[in-house]
Image: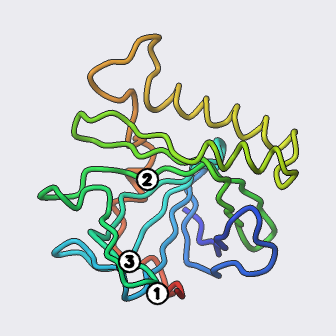
Amino acid sequence: MDRVHVYRGHVEDRVLLLGPLPGLRDGDTLAYEFQLPERFVAWPGRSRLERIFVLLDLGVSMSAPCWQWMRADDGTVVAGPDADRAAPATWYVDLVTVSTTADAIVVRDLYADVMVPEDGRHQRILDLDEYADAMEDGRLDLAAAVDGLRRWQRFFDMHLHSDRDPRERWSDFPPQRLRALAALPAPLGPIITASD
């Protein structure tokens, strides 16, 4: 495993990226961490330290959110994906772009998301409308959009449904290749807190 610096942002962010964040790269798999702001309330027994995994070859990131609920800017309470359950069971998966420099990996969110439960519930695909809007208004060029959709489909085919028809369980989710990075003790390095 190699230590790396990670920067995190959205595909539209040009300068305001979160980082450098501590990360470890194991071949085509990356893990990095950051701490969520205090407005996020962690699950009992967990901290607000969020570990994100990235399948670098597919350009897909994922985490099992550490938070049960959070308070929005207007004061309303927003429940996490499993807030009504006894324990967290859902992963949040993002389509991302990944770029690598000599000393850093930059991960940028690319609109489309899917929530993947481990308890038998169906996945929930989100934000394809935002992906389409970005294509339509020119924020996402055709080549990047096509590449993103192809990578997204490869992720679904490899990790959720490798057979033609859906099965009772995911094909390989969470991906087995995350295990070594998931087993590492936290923190991976200095704790960086995301600002609100």
Mark 3 or mark 1: whose residue is earlier in sequence: 3
| Residues marked 3 and 1 touching at CB (< 8 Å) | yes
The disc label shown at residue 92, or none: 2
- Label pair 1/2, CB-CB below 8 angstroms: no
Residue 87 lies, in percent from the top left, at 17, 58
**Which residue extends farthest left?**
86
Task: Report how far apart the C-alphas of labels 1 and 2 lie in the structure.
Answer: 21 Å
Distance (Cα) linking label 3 and label 1: 8 Å
Disc number for residue 49: 3
Q: Label 3 is placed on what type of residue? A: Leu
- Residue at horizontal 64 percent and vertical 53 percent from the top: 111
**CA gap, disc 3 and disc 2:** 15 Å
Label 2: state its secondary structure.
strand
Residue drawn at (25%, 50%) of the image: 89
Question: Which residue is the site of mark 1?
Answer: 191
SS assignment at label 1? loop
Disc on the earlier residue, 1 or 2: 2
> Horizontal and vertical percent for residue 17?
69, 78
User: Which amino acid is tagged 1?
Assistant: Ile
Quadrant placement of the N terminus: bottom right
Q: How many marks?
A: 3
Give coordinates of residue 134: x percent, y percent.
77, 51
